[in-house]
Amino acid sequence: MAQRTRRPLIGVTAGTRTMMSGAWEGHDAVAVNEHYVRALREAGARPVILAPQDEWSDEEIAELDGLVLTGGTDLDPAAWGDVALATDMTPDPARDAFETALYRAARRSDVPVLGICRGLQIIVIAEGGELHRHLPTDLPAHPTTGRRPTRVEAELEAASDLALALGTRAEVTAYHHQGIRAVRGDLRIVARHESGLPLAVEAETGSSVVGVQWHPEIDGASGAAVFESLLTAVRHREVATPVASLV
């Protein structure tokens, strides 16, 4: 069998943002923090930017080697039958629907997924879980992490893919004011803050799914290990997937 020469193609989700100045002032632009792109490139992958659009088919998502659901604004509570709170950030329902559909297609197609901050929350809600809507009010022991990037300590379950990458204790950069209240479906909690807030999940079965309530794209060497873990999952998927014979 020929040795693979192309870099893994990793879908990276993006939002839209209205440009505030210049010739295109008032027009929407596709926007994603460049740190995600850089982290994936440094890990040896080829990032492919995915902005909200018509739904991808399972066959199309299967052309990717992995998927990264990135950070951003709060999810629209209408998606799970709840009402908006005064503390909610302005939601983006079109992005929510697009990323939720991408996640479900990736699961059906055995494409490894990494969810970061909001991306973790997309995964949790898609699997039927629940969110704390406003921290630290909902969980007073949790530090205020919604105003600026804040260093917090995560305790990781030893029997997890994340622990293989980071060990059982890691200092990470959090920047969120919502978080996991409960997980359901195929997910299990694999990291927590000392306040009790879950900080990471993984899938129990199927292809690799890892979601983190922090920002590895700005966490230096420890963050790089999270992206390298995604590429390890990609390589494992390649080995496990039978290659059709040409003769």
Image: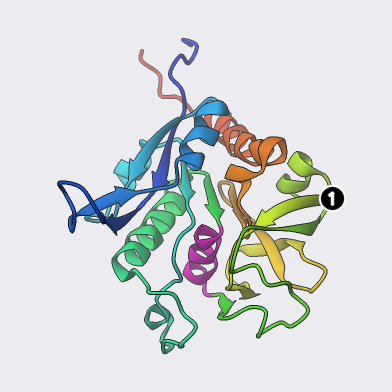
Whether 79 is drawn above or below 118: the answer is: below
At x 54% / y 54%, what residue is drawn?
115
Q: Is residue 165 above or below residue 87?
A: above
Q: How is the image coloured?
A: rainbow
Q: Position of residue 21 (x, y in %)?
A: 24, 52
Q: Position of residue 18 (x, y in %)?
A: 26, 58
- The residue sitting at 42% across, 44% down in the picture is 12
Say what secondary structure mark 1 lies in: loop
Residue 159 visible? The answer is no
Left-right relation of 131 to 65: right
Displayed quadrant of residue 11: top left
Q: Is residue 178 visible?
A: yes
Q: Is residue 121 above or below residue 158?
A: below
Q: Farthest residue in the left direction?
A: 23
Where is residue 237? Give x, y as percent. 55, 35
In the image, residue 90 lies at what x, y percent? Answer: 38, 74
Q: Is residue 106 magenta?
A: no
Q: Residue placed at 46% from the left, 37% from the top? A: 37
Point out the stretch of residues depicted in magenta: 117-128
At label 1, the amino acid type is: Thr
Left/right placement of residue 4 relative to residue 13 reads right
**Could you tell whether 168 is left or right of 245 in the image?**
right
Label the magenta part by its dominant secondary structure: helix
Quick check: 202 above or below 195?
Answer: above
| CA neighbours of label 1 inside 10 A, class few (<14), some (14 to 19), many (20+) | some
Residue on which the image places disc 1: 168
Q: Give me the residue at 43% from left, 72% from top.
A: 75
The quarter of the picture where the C terminus appears is: top left
